[in-house]
Image (spheres, rainbow, N blue to C red):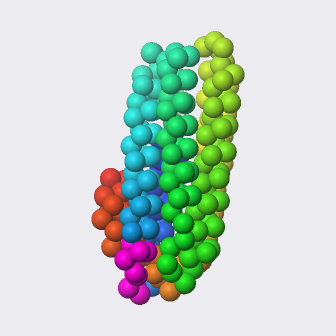
């Protein structure tokens, strides 16, 4: 679960690093701030959900189910938040909006896969299979995030989005918390 948080944090941080130095509109800065706030909340929620799983000696079917439920809920909230961002007021706004919506859809799909994996756990013996499925799901999501980052970098030719991410306080908070 930490891997997924790291991938999305990279999504925001790399988006913040994509070229140019045009001054963005306040709406675009608000868009970037909302994106970073959503990711920060999700990352914190995911870390909290995974906390009970750090002690392998106390793993149980219930702790795995609870962690997965919490991660699923946090991921669905992030997907909803990303979809709710709409289009930033940049020359590449449509491409950015589509990349973010595609990522949100993948987040929803991943949350459903995690839920399905955990639903199949009926004993401690089933935990290994569930963990394997969850790990594979997170790895696939990581590839999707990398693709979304590349799409953002390619779309932000004038640097408007980079400037907005650079200026948004919540993005600075996310960058410092992942460093």
Residue 26 in magenta stretch: yes
In which quadrant of the rendered view does residue 44 lie?
top left
Q: Is residue 122 left or right of residue 169?
A: right
Location of residue 176 (image quadrant): bottom left
Would you say 94 lies left or right of 46 here?
Answer: right
- Report the front residue among 117 and 178: 117
Residue depicted at 65% across the width and 51% down the height: 106
Q: Residue at x 64, y 43 (%)?
A: 110
Of residues 150 and 84, the one nearer the viewer is: 84
Q: Position of residue 109 (x, y in %)?
A: 67, 45
Query: x%, y% of residue 36?
Result: 41, 59
* Residue most extreme to the top: 123
Residue 123 lies, in percent from the top left, at 63, 12
Residue 173 percent coordinates (x, y): 31, 58
The quarter of the picture where the C terminus appears is bottom left
Range of magenta residues? 21-29
In the image, residue 128 sits, relative to residue 159, either above or below, namely above
Q: Quadrant of residue 121?
A: top right
Label total for image: 0
Q: Identify whether 105 is placed above or below 45.
A: below
Residue 9 or 72: which is nearer the viewer? 72
Q: Residue at x 54, y 71 (%)?
A: 87
What residue is shown at x 44% (from left), y 46% (from top)? 42
Kindly tell me whether residue 89 is visible in this rendering: yes
Residue 130 seen by the camera? no
């Amino acid at each position: 679960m930490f891997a997924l948080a790291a991938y999305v944090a990279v999504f925001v941080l790399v988006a913040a690093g994509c070229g140019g130095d045009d001054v963005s509109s306040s709406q675009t800065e608000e868009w970037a701030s909302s994106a970073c706030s959503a990711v920060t909340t999700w990352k914190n929620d995911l870390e909290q959900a995974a906390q009970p799983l750090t002690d392998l000696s106390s793993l149980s079917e219930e702790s795995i189910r609870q962690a997965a439920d919490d991660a699923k809920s946090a991921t669905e909230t992030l997907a909803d938040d990303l979809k709710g961002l709409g289009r930033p007021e940049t020359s590449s706004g449509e491409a950015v909006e589509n990349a973010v919506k595609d990522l949100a859809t993948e987040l929803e799909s991943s949350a459903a896969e995690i839920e399905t994996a955990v639903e199949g756990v009926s004993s401690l013996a089933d935990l290994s299979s569930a963990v394997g499925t969850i790990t594979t799901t997170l790895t696939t999501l990581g590839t999707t995030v990398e693709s979304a980052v590349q799409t953002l970098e390619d779309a932000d030719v004038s640097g408007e989005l980079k400037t907005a991410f650079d200026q948004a306080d919540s993005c600075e908070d996310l960058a410092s918390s992942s460093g």
